[in-house]
Image (spheres, helix red, strand yellow):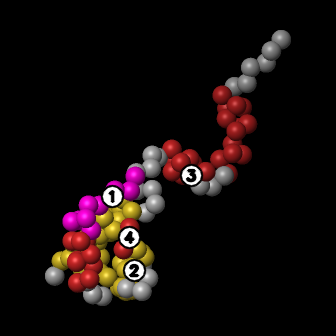
Amino acid sequence: MKHRMSRLQRAKQFMPFAALKGFETLLAAVARSKESRVELSEDQLEELNRIIQSLTEGDFVRVVYYTGHCYTELVGIIETMSKTTYSLCIESVMIYFKDIKEINVYK
């Protein structure tokens, strides 16, 4: 004679797996599709370069940049800017010039 488990007994059997903190978040991240990096045209690159050259620390900007798997938008004040490392820092987030797709300056 087979003994069938109740739903409660069955649920208890799998409860230890719930202790894997962040596992569900990791699964969701893996399941999310990766957004491809957009190749900018020569004109777009020139315009972007012109804007970056005009930036200074303290400027209030909106930046759309590539994070490695998708594009993200960040609005804030440029805290630091380095032309040697080709990067800028907004809200403690380091963004490399090569990852910038779009930037708007609000003066």
Could you tell me the amino acid type at mark 1? Answer: Glu
Q: Earlier in the sequence, mark 2 or mark 4?
A: 2
Q: Secondary structure at mark 3?
A: helix
Based on the picture, tell me whether residue 64 belongs to the magenta stretch. Answer: no
Percent from the top left, x then y, of residue 44?
23, 65
Q: Nearer the viewer, mark 4 or mark 3?
A: 4
Q: Residue at x 29, y 69 (%)?
A: 63
For the residues bearing labels 2 and 4, Cβ distance under 8 angstroms: yes
Residue 88, placed above or below residue 27? below
Say which quadrant the C terminus sits in: bottom left
Q: Nearer the viewer, residue 98 or 21?
A: 98
Could you tell me the amino acid type at mark 4? Answer: Lys
Percent from the top left, x then y, of residue 38?
34, 56
The Cα atoms of the two marked residues, 1 and 3, are separated by 29 Å
Q: Secondary structure at mark 1?
A: loop
Q: Residue at x 67, y 51 (%)?
A: 19
Residue 31, placed above or below residue 99? above
Say which quadrant the N terminus sits in: top right
**Residue identified by numbered label 1:** 39
Mark linked to residue 26: 3
Pointer 4 local density, CA inside 10 Å: few below 14, some 14–19, many at least 20? few
Could you tell me the amino acid type at mark 3? Answer: Leu
The Cα atoms of the two marked residues, 4 and 3, are separated by 27 Å
The Cα atoms of the two marked residues, 1 and 4, are separated by 11 Å
Could you tell me the amino acid type at mark 2? Answer: Tyr
**Residue identified by numbered label 4:** 98
**Residue identified by numbered label 2:** 86
Residue 6 figure quarter? top right
Q: Which residues are magenta?
A: 36-45
Q: Secondary structure at mark 4?
A: helix
Indicate left or right for 90 with 56 as reference: right
